[in-house]
Amino acid sequence: MSADQWYFSRDELFDTPSIADGVSFAQEQMDRIKGCHYLLAVGAKLNLPQLVVVTAATFFHRFFMRQSMKRFHVYDIAATSLFVATKVEECTRRIKDFVNACAQKAQKNDKLYLEEGSKDFVKWKDTMLHNEVILLETLCFDLSIEHPHINLLDYQNQLSVSSSSIRKAWMLLYQSLGQPICVLYRPNVIAAAALLLAAHLSSEQMKDNWWKVADVDIGQVHELAAEMLEYYVDRYIKKSSQSPHP
């Protein structure tokens, strides 16, 4: 099965099933961010490796290119995406722990505990298992993911980039999970954009014609780097500066 089915044009991003159901583009983007941030919180609670979380975020974004947010709540699909990702990446957790982490983060109450067999526990578990089948069918059982992180490590060797820029690029990839860039750009382009932005933020010069060595379209890389920077400033810098000081 070709991986090309999972890359979409910008126009298609404005014509998703959610938008066809009356959700605005801006609202859909906010709900994607909301779902991914929930996914990150549950992943952190379960102490899951970053690879699992990134795989789950990719499943999540792909799912909503083919299904509507009017039909499926983003928290439910985020939880299911993470549940499936733990199996794909062979890093499973006990269903009891998984359900409780999902419930705690949904309720924003880390002291919440659902007893196995309780009404709420069964509801969470059944919803996730029901959605698992729908998720797998929507993804055409195509669960193999190419991650930009692999490209990033390759670039470190090919381009002799400093380890600090690689770490910053890695952080930018993680902080960009709320954006649906994984359905717009190939992993090598995403990695190159994160690296370019990281070098810029670190005031590090990239080698001349580095993009030729990386075998990427420099126009695409600059376009995506600008998007990632805007997202980073809006979601992290501005929010941080607006937070009340102690």
Image (tube, grey):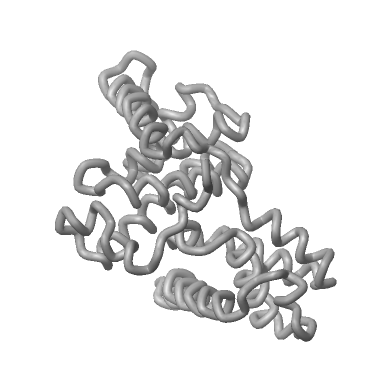
Relative to 45, residue 32 above or below: below
Q: Residue at x 63, y 57 (%)?
A: 148
Q: Residue at x 43, y 52 (%)?
A: 36
Residue nearest the observer in this picture, 176 or 156? 156
The tally of labels here is 0
Q: Residue at x 51, y 72 (%)?
A: 228
Residue nearest the observer in this picture, 226 or 115? 226
Q: Is residue 92 left or right of residue 119?
A: right
Q: Residue furthest top?
A: 117
Quadrant in the picture for residue 169: bottom right
Q: Position of residue 129 (x, y in %)?
A: 37, 24
Q: Is residue 191 left or right of residue 164?
A: left
Q: Position of residue 72 (x, y in %)?
A: 26, 41
Q: Position of residue 108 (x, y in %)?
A: 36, 45
Q: Residue furthest left?
A: 22
Relative to 129, residue 168 above or below: below
Q: Is residue 3 left or right of residue 134?
A: right
Q: Position of residue 27 (x, y in %)?
A: 25, 63
Relative to 163, residue 66 above or below: above
Is residue 237 visible in the rendered image? The answer is no
